[in-house]
Image (cartoon, coloured by chain):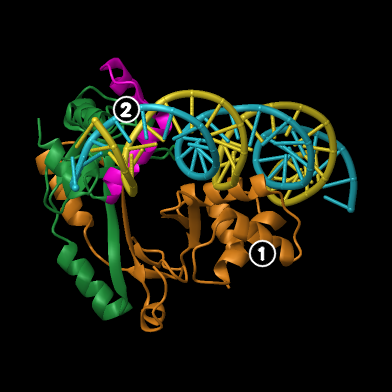
Chain colours: A orange, B green, C yellow, D cyan
Amino acid sequence: MQDFEGLLRGLKLKVTPRRRAILEVMAAGSTFLSPEEIWKKVGEAGTNVGLPTVYRILEELAGGGVVTRVLHDNRQLYYYLCPNKGHHHHFVCLSCHKVEDVDLCLGEALEQEVKLRIQGALFSHILQLQGLCRECREKGGKA
Amino acid sequence: MQDFEGLLRGLKLKVTPRRRAILEVMAAGSTFLSPEEIWKKVGEAGTNVGLPTVYRILEELAGGGVVTRVLHDNRQLYYYLCPNKGHHHHFVCLSCHKVEDVDLCLGEALEQEVKLRIQGALFSHILQLQGLCRECREKGGKA
DNA sequence: AGTTAAATAGAAATCACTTCTATTTGACGA
DNA sequence: TCGTCAAATAGAAGTGATTTCTATTTAACT
């Protein structure tokens, strides 16, 4: 359980029941979820919400760095609420959708490469690892 | 100009005029292109092709590792035919869509991290840098 | 040249996602 | 505590990139 209020205020977003409900649903698990999955879970938890609202709130949270977008081969966007606040990246399990942190310090190297070789400006970067987590690997999970 | 025939045969794909035309269009520039842009260029170059065919061929080539998918904030997928064959990643310019190679050897570190900490199986990873290339930075290109 | 599985065109469908507008509500000051 | 108002939301409708489908064509290999 986290300080959702402070989190929302930090983004200058009003504290509303929908935002709170979405954060609660996302914090309840450590897997990435589709907007529709989140929408269903929020509904089951007793908060009525429209699907467009879920999309909007997720993008607000992603823009504020509170949730991470997870890329998927099926072209859908998924989202993950990461409790870890420092800069890092994610390993996502293609079978059970669990997300695990990957602490790899490539920020420096990237900055250097772009500065020296490309001589451009680096705005952002995406690093995402895909595979099977330990449990799914051991039970021979599907790819 | 490259050995498109050998490239297609390597993927066990028939050598057809559409596939050849798409590869030629993609090899002609060093920017990432949308399926529709490719479709238009192929048409202008004198080869009639259906848009669904372009989508299909691009995915065939991407699956075979011949072209790289470029992720974009607008949720469209773009494609880039990279002449560099070794394992590497890309810096994409958000203004002019130019793609530049980034030779960062994080393969080893990734393998280690996943093997030791996650104890899972690593299938693939995505690394993409976004920013402005030198020219666009100097002329103050749009983000 | 004949055969066949692969490739393609073009129309139609899909569906994740966005937009729009009227209504509601949280935040803040009186 | 209450009034005000910009922000937030619902729900319907729209959008458009991408996919599917089926009949037809074609490259590859006899």
Q: Secondary structure at mark 1?
A: helix
Looking at the rendered structure, which numbered label has been put on residue A82? none
Q: Quadrant of the N terminus of chain B?
A: top left
Q: Is residue C18 left or right of residue A93?
A: right
Residue lying furthest bottom in this view? Answer: A138
Quadrant of the image occupied by residue A98: bottom left
User: Of circles 1 and 2, which is in front?
Assistant: 2
Residue A83 colored in magenta in the image:
no
Q: Count all numbered tags in the image, as a single digit.
A: 2
State the image coordinates of residue C3 (x, y, percent, origin top left).
31, 43
Disc 1 to disc 2, C-alpha distance: 41 Å
Looking at the rendered structure, which numbered label has been put on residue A41? 1
State the image coordinates of residue A63 (x, y, percent, origin top left).
47, 47
Residue B49 colored in magenta in the image:
yes
Residue B34 sits above or below residue A122 on the image: above
Give the chain of mark 1.
A
Q: Nearer the viewer, residue B142 or B47?
A: B47
Q: Secondary structure at mark 2?
A: helix
Magenta stretch, residue numbers: B36-63
Looking at the rendered structure, which numbered label has been put on residue B38? 2
Give the chain of mark 2.
B
The type of residue carrying mark 2 is Ile
**Res. B40 in view:** yes
Quadrant of the image occupied by residue B82: top left
State the image coordinates of residue D30 (x, y, percent, origin top left).
19, 47
**Residue at 38 percent of width and 34 percent of height:** B53
Quadrant of the image occupied by residue B74: top left
Q: Is residue A26 left or right of residue C2?
A: right
The type of residue carrying mark 1 is Lys
Residue B80 sits above or below residue A50 on the image: above
State the image coordinates of residue B89 (x, y, percent, origin top left).
20, 49
Q: Nearer the viewer, residue B68 or A111?
A: B68
